[in-house]
Amino acid sequence: LPFSSLGKPSGLQVGFTLYQRMLASVFNASSVAATHLLLRLLLLPCCYGLLWLFYKNIKDNPWTFVSQNGLLFNSLLGTYLCSIITTATTYPIYRTRYYQEAQEGLYSGPLFLLSYWLFSLPFSFLTVAVSSRMLFEVTGLTTAREWCLFAAVLWACYLLAEQQTISLLMVVHSSFTAALASLYIAIVCLVLGSGSLRSYRGLPDWLMYLTYGTQT
């Protein structure tokens, strides 16, 4: 019985198959899969571990307020950086497969991107949850609600950098070039949104509105 007689599979079936294949590409015995899994799960905790070493005595510092601002800024920067590196390293193999199969009309771009987003979501959630807990002790925050808010902000930054890098990788062939462009955009938004460049009150109107835009 030819497969054509069974009819074309639905979008849900194709998406679920893509999701299963992406999971299988990570959880196998190859060195590439192990490297990608370690990047997804351990890169951000290692980065935050270094930040914890630098800021663990923050309470003993007479300039505590300034140090806490620096901790927050560096934690956001580290989140953007790790997300960009992870995405630029792990995404191209899925992009290549998509271009090959899209030419055959097997599935569309939105379905592929949705499947990849659902695939990467648990990994980003897990690594951000563990990493945020590492820094939570030195932020001066105490309650579980504050930790959840802190983790939610970092997770939002992680997902933003991931989707931004994916968008660039869909039009830029070089992973290195796409990663640099994504990092540049993230740094500009972070500097504008943090007020590190200049006090909000001293900004021109157009730049102040851009600053508010980066925060939303």
Image (tube, grey):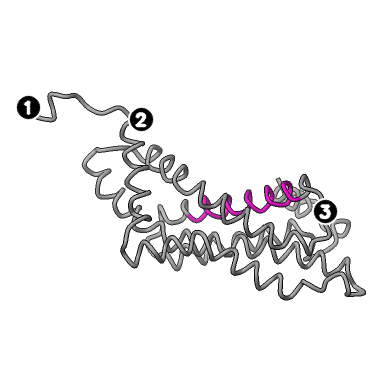
User: In what element is the residue under mark 3?
Assistant: loop
**89 displayed left or right of 93:** right
Q: Which mark is residue 203?
A: none
Could you tell me if the residues under marks 2 and 1 are in contact, i.e. CB atoms within 8 Å? no
Query: Residue 161's spot in the image, x, y percent?
Result: 56, 55
Q: Would you say the magenta stretch is mainly helix, strand or loop? A: helix
Query: Which is nearer the N-term, disc 3 or disc 2?
Result: 2
**195 displayed left or right of 21:** right
- Residue occupying the point 36% across, 49% down: 22
User: In what element is the residue under mark 2?
Assistant: helix
Query: Residue 41's spot in the image, x, y percent?
Result: 51, 60
**In which quadrant of the rendered image does the C terminus lie?**
top right
158 drawn magenta: yes
Q: CA distance from mark 3 to mark 2?
A: 43 Å
Give the labeled residue for mark 3.
142
- Residue occupying the point 31% across, 39% down: 17
Q: CA distance from mark 2 to mark 1?
A: 23 Å
Q: What span is colored magenta in the figure?
A: 147-165
Give the labeled residue for mark 2.
12
